[in-house]
């Protein structure tokens, strides 16, 4: 797959650019995330070999920071706010309904690769609680009953 080869070449270039710098792992992981869209184990291994660190170190950093994803993300990433304002207004019920409708637990992607379901911290739109985002689109004052209708817009 030539496209994949190019991605690995871009990754190797990023490794070479940062190799030897203190804290090189963070910028290389960031570039890997941008290049591949996520950081699968083969990529973690390539980074470990390239930077001369252990796979455990790469894995540790990749799992610690929420900005890195170890699995491919869906076409639509849903984030339901579980911040205090949203939580008290029932966002957990909205999240549960999404999980039921999509038949996936929080943090997972549907097998067809269309939706990823996440819980998030405060999205800064507490006045609209409970809030969720689908990619860049914001939905506020949600009830669980609205979930199927919203999902059907993306299906
Ligand atoms: S708590 Fe949900 S947007 Fe602030």
Image (cartoon, helix red, strand yellow):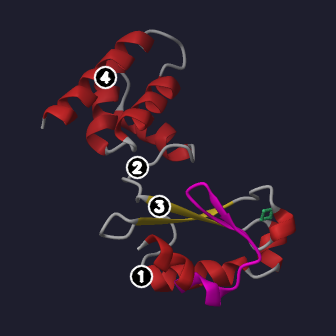
Q: Secondary structure at mark 2?
A: loop
Work out whether 25 lies above or below 106.
above
Q: Secondary structure at mark 1?
A: loop
Which residue is nearer to you in this view: 20 or 85?
85
Identify the image quadrant of residue 104. Answer: bottom left
Q: Secondary structure at mark 4?
A: helix
Q: Secondary structure at mark 3?
A: strand
Residue 107 is left or right of residue 15, and the answer is: right
Work out whether 145 lies above or below 151.
below
Task: Identify the residue shown where x is 55% and y is 57%.
Answer: 135
Of the two numbered discs 4 and 2 in the rendering, the one whose residue sits closer to the viewer: 4
Residue named by callout 1? 103
Q: Are marks 3 and 2 in contact (CB under 8 Å)?
A: no
Task: Identify the residue shown where x is 60% and y is 54%.
Answer: 136
Residue 86 is left or right of residue 27, and the answer is: right
Q: Earlier in the sequence, mark 4 or mark 2?
A: 4
Magenta span includes 116: no
Q: Which residues are magenta?
A: 131-148
- How far is disc 4 from disc 2 in space, using C-alphas? 19 Å
How many badges with numbers are in the image? Answer: 4
Count neighbours of disc 3 (C-alpha within 10 A) and say few if under 14, some if 14 to 19, many if 20 or more: some
Tell me the number on the disc at residue 70: 2
């Amino acid at each position: 797959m030539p496209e994949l080869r190019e991605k690995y070449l871009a990754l190797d270039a990023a490794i070479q650019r940062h190799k030897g710098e203190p804290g090189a792992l963070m910028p290389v992981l960031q570039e890997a995330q941008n290049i591949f869209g996520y950081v699968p184990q083969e990529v973690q291994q390539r980074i470990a070999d390239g930077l001369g660190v252990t796979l455990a170190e790469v894995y540790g950093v990749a799992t610690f920071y929420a900005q890195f994803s170890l699995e491919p993300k869906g076409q639509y990433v849903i984030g339901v706010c579980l911040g205090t304002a949203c939580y008290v207004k029932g966002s957990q019920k909205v999240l549960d309904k999404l999980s039921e409708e999509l038949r996936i637990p929080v943090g997972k992607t549907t097998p067809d690769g269309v939706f990823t379901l996440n819980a998030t911290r405060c999205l800064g739109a507490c006045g609209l609680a409970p809030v969720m985002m689908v990619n860049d689109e914001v939905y506020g004052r949600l009830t669980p009953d609205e979930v199927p209708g919203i999902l059907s817009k993306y299906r």
